């Protein structure tokens, strides 16, 4: 079964908006684990506008499931954060300074030498590695050449087109990319704008999908459906059980 890792950046954003510790980030992460998620994802950024670097140390001590740290490895502070905490997985994302959210994958051909060096550094510390990529065959091949364990398919294009009723066309490049990744021995993760309306279709059509990382949509759904129920609904999307959510068809 495909694993669900819940990105808790938005919980940190809400906490930071008023100062103090409400909602309690660590308690929320522990509750998400208790509700059935297989992991917790964080994506700290240099301005610490949501996840703070100190949060990562606390989370690593507290949680018992997998910790996935996403971020831009061109920032030395991020590299040291990962090496200090030794999460189960590090996902390398080519963010630019001040970027609101991730919006593209790595050019794994242009940056092959650099990515190979960073992948080697993290793997030497026993950290599973993943590279954020667009669903382009050449980028998958480039990722494999770096020695990474996995790729994370950037799914915004799939989400946008499937919302327009173009699911078959939307999923096609991801199927091709997944087949190439399988052929090359790469594990497959996915993330960005996956939700209760598009997740199950994606999961059922992507061979070898190991993990999805979902934050924004899941937290938004939790406002209406409750956090425990929402985590269970997302897990159900990752099974072969038909899903129906009231008000969403």
Image (cartoon, rainbow, N blue to C red):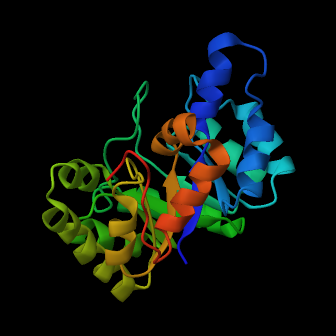
Q: Is residue 196 visible?
A: yes
- Measured as percent of width and height from the top left, residue 40 is found at 66, 52
Q: Looking at the image, which is closer to me, 245 or 38?
A: 245
Residue that lies at the very extreme toward the front in this rendered image: 246
- Measured as percent of width and height from the top left, residue 232 is found at 60, 59
Q: Looking at the image, which is closer to me, 232 or 127?
A: 232
Residue that lies at the very extreme toward the bottom in this rendered image: 183
Q: Is residue 68 above or below residue 13?
A: below
Going by the image, does 66 lie left or right of 121? Answer: right
Going by the image, does 105 lie left or right of 77? Answer: left
- Measured as percent of width and height from the top left, residue 199 is found at 39, 61
Tell how many labels.
0
Q: Residue at x 33, y 68 (%)?
A: 201
Q: Is residue 14 above or below residue 174?
A: above
In the rendered view of the protein, which quadrant contains the N terminus? bottom right
Q: Residue at x 29, y 55 (%)?
A: 107
| Quarter of the image where one finds residue 217 | top left
Q: Is residue 110 above or below residue 44?
A: below
Going by the image, does 141 lie left or right of 119? Answer: left
Residue that lies at the very extreme toward the top in this rendered image: 18
Q: Residue at x 57, y 50 (%)?
A: 230
Going by the image, does 73 lie left or right of 168? Answer: right
Q: Looking at the image, which is closer to me, 86 or 101?
A: 101
Q: Residue at x 29, y 58 (%)?
A: 134
Q: Is residue 195 above or below residue 13?
A: below
Residue that lies at the very extreme toward the right in this rendered image: 61
- Measured as percent of width and height from the top left, residue 109 is found at 28, 62
Q: Is residue 84 visible?
A: no
């Amino acid at each position: 079964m495909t694993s669900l890792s819940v990105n808790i950046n938005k919980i940190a954003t809400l906490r930071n908006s008023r100062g103090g510790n409400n909602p309690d980030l660590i308690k929320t992460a522990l509750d998400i684990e208790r509700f059935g998620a297989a992991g917790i994802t964080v994506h700290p950024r240099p301005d610490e506008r949501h996840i703070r670097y100190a949060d990562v140390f606390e989370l690593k001590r507290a949680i018992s499931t997998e910790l996935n740290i996403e971020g831009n490895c061109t920032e030395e502070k991020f590299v040291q954060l990962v090496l200090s905490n030794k999460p189960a997985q590090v996902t390398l994302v080519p963010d630019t300074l001040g970027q609101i959210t991730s919006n593209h994958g790595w050019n794994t051909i242009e940056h092959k030498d650099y990515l190979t060096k960073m992948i080697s550094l993290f793997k030497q510390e026993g950290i599973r590695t993943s590279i954020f990529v667009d669903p382009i065959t050449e980028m998958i091949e480039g990722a494999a050449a770096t020695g990474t364990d996995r790729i994370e398919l950037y799914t915004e294009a799939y989400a946008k087109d499937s919302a327009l009723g173009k699911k078959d066309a939307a999923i096609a490049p991801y199927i091709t990319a997944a087949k190439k990744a399988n052929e090359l021995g790469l594990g497959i993760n996915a993330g960005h704008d996956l939700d209760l309306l598009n997740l199950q279709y994606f999961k059922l059509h992507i061979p070898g999908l190991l993990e999805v990382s979902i934050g924004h949509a899941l937290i938004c759904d939790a406002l209406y459906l409750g956090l425990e129920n929402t985590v269970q609904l997302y897990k159900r999307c990752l099974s072969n059980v038909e899903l129906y959510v009231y008000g969403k068809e």
